[in-house]
Structure formats: structure tokens, C-alpha cells
Image: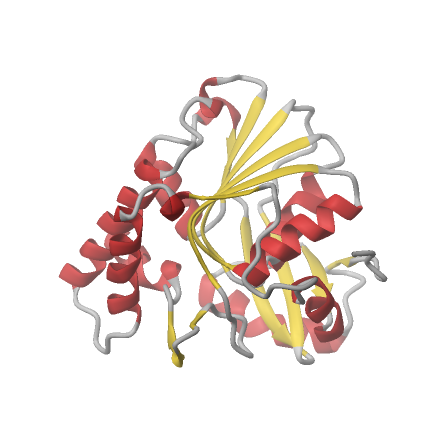
Amino acid sequence: MTLHFTLQKMTRQSAPATLLAAAEPFERTFGTTFERFVVFPAHQLQELHQPDSDPNSVPENVTIGSRTDERIVADIDVLYRVANSSDVTRQQREEYLDALKRIYSRLPSNPGELCKRADTLCVGIEREGRLLAQEMGWLPPEHSAQPNLKRIPYEGGLVVGLVNLPPAKQYAHCSIVDGAIASGATIISLIEHLRETIPSFSIFSAHSSTEGVRAIARYFHSNGVDVTITVGHVTTGINKKFYAIDPRDTTKLVVGDLGDTISELEE
């Protein structure tokens, strides 16, 4: 499928007042100031997400762990139960984190060996990606980064705010750990920044929507960037807020907000 757009990237200084106003509550909540923004208008997200034919099909460069290890589905069920609970307890948060760690340990491939290589930049996206990568020992201090990227609703689409990005440095490869992929916008924004100096990327996530992995694979295939994606499980369907939803009951989230659920365990 041929894409008909170029990503709109801007610095804080060049961003319109309406965008900065949309970002401000997120900056206040997370105690940060975004340095850059990437804009994904609604029609562009729709183009990235729409299937060529089968709505449940995934690109060839996507590996799904649950297709060869059914235990991952049981772990996803734990995430689902907690994500749709009210007044989540600390014990439930711990069960949620344990299930995430089991999913990563059961992936057909993981960043473990990659992160032993000095020519690989190992990235854990704040919050959940960084926390999970730390838990798994996948952020070697000599060649790792923990950028902060947040997606922000904006005019029916999304804006991704970026801060704490790693400096431009040549690496042969990049390993990216994220908790869950929904729209794909966050991963696309990160790789857009890094691909000026890094030619090859491996993405690891516990869960993804079909739409999210399709968007990532489609965008970077059209731009000639080498990207592979390994996820624990995939489901089809995202809501208007770009969260993955249960295709059997669209009022339910599949995994919810991982950062909100597990970040309190660091306190």
C-alpha cells in the first residue's frame, strides 16, 4: 500500500499554541516539558491502520508469541482482568507485572542477546517499557536510553510529545522495549528520530493491536527502514482513544494503561 503523507515533525518553538495547550496537561501530570512533537492527523492514522484485505492479518515481519506458546494467552487474561477492574489493589498490580515479565520471558526472541552487543542501542520507553526492560536486565548502562514519549489526543488524531531522546550516535542496531502497542504512533515517532543514525530496529512488546503493528510495518516498509516486531499476543480493534479493545466486548480494554498500572510499584 502506498502512503500519501509525510509525518509532521516540529520543535516546541515551532509548535502552534493549540498543540502546546493540548500537551500542557500531560506535561503537568508527568512533570516534563516536551522538546519535540510528531503529529498524526486522524485521516493519516486511518490510512496506516486500515487492512489491505483480512482485518486480522499481520505483516510478515511480525512474530506473535502466543501462536507457539499458549501460556501467553493465560498471561494476557491476567492483564485483561486487572485492566478492567475498579480500584486496583497493589496485589493486582504485582500480578499484572509478573504476567508481563512472563510474557517477555516466553517470547520467541527477546533483547537479551542483542543487549550484550556494544553496537546495539537498547531503548526502554518511559514508563512501562523502561520499567520492564530494567526488570529483565535489558538496559545496559553503557549503551541504553530511556526516552519519554507520550501520545496526546489532538483534533481527532494524535500528537506524540518527545523528550529525553538519545543523542545522535551511530549504532548497527536498536532494540526497543515497549509495554503495549495500540496505535503504533509512539514507536513510529521514536524510530523516525533514531533512523538518521541507526539502520535496523527490533521491537518487543507484550501485546499489540493488529492496527498498531500494521501501522509500524507499513510506514517503515514504505520508507525502506529495516524493522522487525515481536509481540506476545495480538488482538484486533482500537477505540476512539486509541486503546486496544476486546473484539468480543468493545467496552473492555485488552491490557489498559500499563504505565498507570505498574508505575506505582516503583514508589
Residue 155 pos. (x, y %): 69, 80
Q: Is residue 4 left or right of residue 225?
A: right
Q: Is residue 102 above or below residue 167?
A: below
Q: Is residue 210 above or below residue 86?
A: above
Quadrant in which residue 56 is drawn: bottom right
Q: Does the rendering let one see residue 267?
A: no
Q: Residue at x 21, y 70 (%)?
A: 88
The quarter of the image holding the C terminus is: bottom left
Quadrant in which residue 134 is drawn: top left
The quarter of the image holding the N terminus is: bottom right
Residue 168 pos. (x, y %): 70, 32
Q: Is residue 217 above or below residue 26?
A: above
Q: Residue at x 30, y 69 (%)?
A: 83
Q: Residue at x 46, y 68 (%)?
A: 244
Quadrant in which residue 259 is drawn: bottom left
Residue found at the far left of this picture: 91
Q: Is residue 202 left or right of residue 43?
A: left
Residue 27 pos. (x, y %): 54, 65
Q: Does the rendering let one see residue 206?
A: yes
In the image, 221 versus 25, the foreground residue is 221
Residue 226 pos. (x, y %): 69, 35
In the image, 161 versus 13, the foreground residue is 161
